[in-house]
Image (spheres, grey):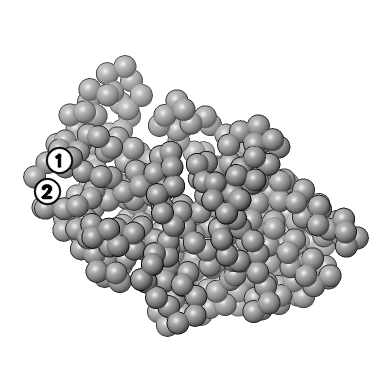
């Protein structure tokens, strides 16, 4: 029996900007449940069984205490749907040192770099990976002049830093930066569209000559409203508009429709990006157990980090982990609101080993030294 723990917290999240997007109470965990079903489909032939233990604490609950309960039985396989501070607090528990924790929520580059942990692996693409994937496409299109519009949050600043890094790596140029400081509270009121129709042209008027407006709005406070409202006739890319994503409801290439249909049948809704990442995390554990025919965590961990480990993710190639920072290598979708536009890495961006290592921090530039208590 292989037990996988889904450790999460009911964080307060802003309501969707559009009425088309419904608030979801099972985002992530629904993907993990499908992953368990898929693991057992294969496991039945090998006399292996997989179960998932759902450990989701309330908004004001103590996730560290919940983790300690899980770890009373020893090392654990954990799918972590946690914000960065909670993720690190769990990873740094002495009793978690030998566990394998798969991050499916946070894109922060620091978690893969200076704040990396030996027991933490990352299914979610980093900000750097997302920015690099989109930058490659824009440079391939010769849309290399970017007008960066950044929100007010720390996460917006982190994503904006990744955009600037991508510009230096691939030959793009951030020709101007501006910050969105307006109060977004009016956006769902009866007259909200009139205020937005005024504010967005004001925000973007008179910018330096550019090819695209690049939105850095991780929390979706304003970026969606840039589309069709900029002062000039501009494509919007970044966290809204044309995006780099691990998964999207419109994706159907490489038999992706098969996964989309299976999820909709099981969950009665579309598969979100976090659902996909949770599904993939559970499949990582399933693949390791199936290939090794073992259930002990040191063996599974060693296999996940080995050259023999590969997991299928409906992206046209097998996915593997980077040994230097435990980030999952994967192609990213370049996706519009309703259709796939491209996939990165783009043609012409070369790497001596893995083309997917052109996305994010490659080994020579990585700052990860697996510090912290779990090192």
- Residue 12 is situated, as x and y percent measured from the top left of the image, at 51, 38
Q: Which mark is residue 207?
A: 2
Q: Residue at x 64, y 39 (%)?
A: 261
Cα separation, mark 2 vs mark 1, equals 9 Å
Q: Which residue is most to the left?
A: 206
Could you tell me which secondary element the residue under label 1 belongs to?
A: loop
| Camera sees residue 56 | no
Residue located beneath label 1 in the image: 232
- Residue 70 is situated, as x and y percent measured from the top left of the image, at 76, 57
- Residue 85 is situated, as x and y percent measured from the top left of the image, at 52, 57
| Camera sees residue 196 | yes
Residue situated in front as seen by the camera: 204 or 87 = 204
Q: Are marks 2 and 1 in contact (CB under 8 Å)?
A: yes
Side (left or right) of 245 relative to 188: right
Q: Residue at x 58, y 37 (%)?
A: 270
Side (left or right) of 53 relative to 60: right
Front position among marks 2 and 1: 1
Q: Are there few (<14), some (14-19), or many (20+) residues within 10 Å of tag 1? A: some
Q: Earlier in the sequence, mark 2 or mark 1?
A: 2
Side (left or right) of 85 relative to 127: right
Q: Residue at x 65, y 69 (%)?
A: 310
Height in image: 199 above or below 345? above
Query: Which image quarter holds the N terminus?
Result: bottom right
């Amino acid at each position: 029996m292989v037990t996988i723990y889904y450790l999460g917290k009911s964080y307060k999240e802003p309501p969707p900007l559009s009425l088309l997007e419904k608030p979801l109470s099972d985002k992530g965990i629904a993907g993990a449940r499908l992953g368990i079903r898929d693991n057992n489909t294969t496991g039945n032939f090998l006399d292996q069984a997989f179960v998932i233990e759902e450990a989701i604490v309330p908004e004001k609950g103590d996730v560290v205490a919940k983790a300690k309960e899980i770890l009373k039985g020893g090392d654990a396989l954990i799918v972590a749907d946690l914000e960065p501070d909670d993720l690190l607090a769990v990873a740094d528990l002495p009793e978690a040192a030998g566990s394998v924790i798969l991050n499916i929520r946070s894109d922060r580059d620091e978690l893969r770099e200076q704040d990396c942990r030996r027991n933490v692996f990352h299914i979610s693409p980093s900000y750097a990976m997302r920015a690099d994937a989109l930058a490659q496409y824009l440079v391939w299109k010769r849309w290399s002049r970017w007008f960066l519009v950044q929100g007010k949050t720390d996460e917006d600043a982190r994503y904006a830093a990744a955009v600037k890094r991508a510009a230096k790596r691939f030959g793009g140029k951030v020709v101007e930066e501006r910050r969105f400081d307006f109060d977004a509270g009016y956006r769902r009121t009866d007259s909200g569209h009139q205020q937005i129709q005024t504010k967005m042209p004001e925000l973007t008027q008179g910018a330096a000559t550019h090819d695209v407006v690049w939105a850095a709005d991780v929390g979706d406070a304003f970026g969606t409203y840039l589309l069709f409202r900029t002062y000039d006739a501009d494509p919007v890319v970044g966290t809204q508009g044309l995006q780099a994503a691990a998964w999207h409801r419109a994706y159907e290439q490489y038999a992706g429709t098969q996964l989309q249909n299976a999820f909709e049948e099981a969950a009665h809704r579309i598969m979100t990006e976090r659902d996909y990442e949770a599904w993939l995390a559970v499949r990582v554990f399933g693949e390791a157990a199936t290939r090794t025919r073992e259930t002990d965590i040191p063996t599974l961990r060693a296999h996940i980090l080995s050259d023999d480990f590969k997991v299928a993710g409906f992206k046209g190639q097998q996915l593997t982990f980077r040994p230097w920072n435990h980030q999952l290598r994967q192609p990213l979708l370049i996706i519009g609101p309703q259709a796939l536009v491209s996939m990165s890495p783009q043609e012409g961006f070369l790497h001596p080993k893995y083309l997917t290592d052109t996305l994010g921090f490659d080994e020579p530039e990585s700052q990860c030294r697996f510090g912290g208590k779990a090192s």
